[in-house]
Amino acid sequence: MKALTWHGKGDIRCEAVPDPKIEDGRDAIIKVTSCAICGSDLHLMGGFVPTMESGDVLGHECMGEVVEVGRENTKLKVGDRIVVPFTICCGECRQCKWGNWSLCERSNRNGKLQAEQFGYPGAGLFGYSHVTGGYAGGQAEYIRVPYADVTHLKVPENLTDEQVLFLSDIFPTAWMAAENCEIKPGDTIAVWGCGPVGQLTIRSCFLLGAKRVIAIDTVPERLAMAAASGAITIDFMKEDVYDRIQDLTHGRGADACIDAVGTEPRTGASFDSVIDRVKVATFMGTDRPHVLRQAIQSCRNFGTVSIVGVYGGLLDNIPMGSAINRGLTFRMAQTPVQHYLPKLLDRVERGEIDPSFVITHTASLEEGPDLYKTFRDKKDGCIKVVLKP
Ligand SMILES: [Zn+2]
Ligand SMILES: [Zn+2]
């Protein structure tokens, strides 16, 4: 079959790889009908995620049709149409039973390796390095889904792929980012980053009752899309973000601040972002947490900082003095996707939200490597890419 594979920093190829096979009784093989490139795939492309190996199949946002089912899998049958959550979970361990699906205690085959880095391991993830289990991803014609009797969401035929595909990751992630802010009527929520997750976060904040959403980015088409969703926009290259939030909130700060950027912010608008860049380039640091610093500073007293942007290691110069003295609450997680699926599918079915509005590019798998670059360089108005294997 054909798949998008990783071959080192900046080197992604579409090439032939062996077809996946059933390895365990609970597995299923899915013929992928749609898959997407995620902002976090760019961290892999940039070479920022250790334990990638040449030839690894990429992709953790996909859906398709079940074409083969393991003997013990009684939940799925050939022909079922499913979305595949990016977090692999067994459904039986303590964390799965608690609903903390992204921290399944069984699905990460290389959990020991991850525990060395993080203290304790998380769940196995599709197409996201060997430290998360080394599972082949879904930017491919077929994918093997382990624990597929639990790791799936059946979707109705009357919804298009585009309407449900993002239930695999970015819509639940965006929803969690908003829900973690415990939004009350009248609240003002500031969202850093107007990529696909940021866009869906803005809509989620409004659906959860926010009065105002302030969207921060610098890419014109992203800001335009945020404004079309009803957000007040700030271009951080043209305005001081903290000052503008001050103006908008009578000097109090935003009720909650959401970091939907993570470790690779655009450098240049502030001194600390330049220092971060130098530190990472000289191996003196692992992450560039400029956005997190600004989110903390811009949050009102006893407000919430909600983090869904990806960080990987040790973050320098985080203003903990500000956070502690002003009583901020920090909320963050690798999204426990399954927890959000039934209610979000419901909202899509009821027509409250159609997540497909973020899609700007649809292409074949063969065009995937070029579109990775287009997406990375934010060229051609690119906000979200969907591939059709
Ligand atoms: Zn993703
Ligand atoms: Zn589990």
Image (cartoon, rainbow, N blue to C red):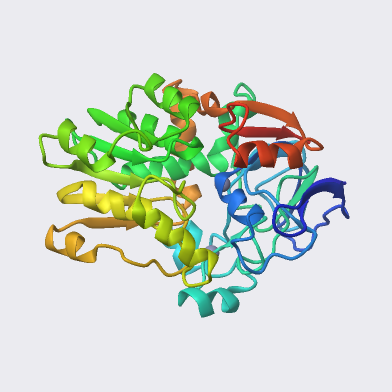
Indicate left or right for 202 with 143 as reference.
left
Depth check, front residue: 143 or 332: 332
Relative to 274, is 351 above or below? above
Indicate left or right for 223 with 122 as reference.
left
Depth check, front residue: 146 or 222: 222
Q: Residue at x 29, y 38 (%)?
A: 190
Relative to 314, is 247 above or below? above
Q: Residue at x 68, y 41 (%)?
A: 373
Relative to 88, is 77 above or below? above
Q: Position of residue 301 (x, y in %)?
A: 13, 51
The image quarter containing residue 124 is bottom right
Q: Residue at x 82, y 37 (%)?
A: 366
The image quarter containing residue 66 is top right
Q: Position of residue 154 (x, y in %)?
A: 61, 38
Indicate left or right for 242 with 98 as reference.
left
Q: Is residue 63 visible?
A: no
Indicate left or right for 304 with 351 as reference.
left
Q: Position of residue 125 (x, y in %)?
A: 61, 58
